[in-house]
Amino acid sequence: MSRNIYVVTRNEISPTLFLKALKNNGLAVVGETSMEGRFYLGRKEQSVWAYLDNDELQFLEDSMMRRIEELLDGSPKDCINIAVSSRNNSERLAIEIVDYLLGEFTGILYNFNNRVYSPIDVARIVRDEPEPIL
């Protein structure tokens, strides 16, 4: 079973650019599926799926979309869905991936507990691990 978190960006991200960003971080892209823009990422026993998924944006309530637009200082252009495995501390791998992606693209982290995290919040979580993101 997996749980999902979302990186909502102000950038338009092609599957090629997305894969390049993941590989530039030194992430082991374990498998690329036949579905363009879907990548399985792993490190030891930790694993996540990461893929471009703009369909998720349509499910946001208007008030949450306004909040995200305010934090982005513009309209969201792309959404990266990160499906986090429930085994072996995969959440740690996921938050490190999010931290890296927020360094590459202008964006925020959103989860369906209606929490929004700025890049500064994410960096603090990576550094201090004060709270779970899922």
Image (cartoon, rainbow, N blue to C red):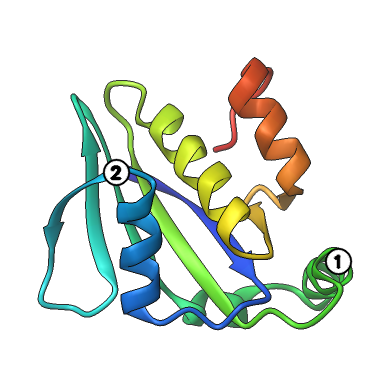
Relative placement, left or right, of 82 versus 42 is right
Residue matched to label 1? 67
**Who's the residue at 25% across and 47% down the image?**
41
Label 2: element kind: loop
Relative placement, left or right, of 54 versus 47 is right
Label 1: element kind: helix
- The amino acid pointed to by label 1 is Arg
Query: Tag on residue 77?
Result: none
Q: Is residue 132 above or below residue 134?
A: above
Residue 95 position within the rendered picture, expressed as x and y whole percent measured from the top left? 51, 37
Relative placement, left or right, of 68 versus 56 is right
Q: Nearer the viewer, residue 5 or 103?
A: 103
**Who's the residue at 77% across and 40% down the image?**
120
Residue 28 position within the rendered picture, expressed as x and y whole percent measured from the top left? 21, 44
Q: Nearer the viewer, residue 49 or 113?
A: 49
Q: Nearer the viewer, residue 18 or 6?
A: 18
- The amino acid pointed to by label 2 is Leu
Q: Residue furthest front?
A: 24
Residue matched to label 2? 27
Q: Is residue 31 above or below residue 53?
A: above
Quote the CA–CA distance across marks 1 and 2. Answer: 31 Å
* Dot 1 alpha-carbon crowd within 10 angstroms: few under 14, some 14 to 19, many 20 or more: few
Q: Is residue 117 above or below residue 129?
A: below
**Who's the residue at 60% across and 64% down the image?**
105
**Who's the residue at 63% across and 21% down the image?**
127
Residue 72 position within the rendered picture, expressed as x and y whole percent measured from the top left? 80, 68
Residue 107 position within the rendered picture, expressed as x and y whole percent measured from the top left? 68, 62
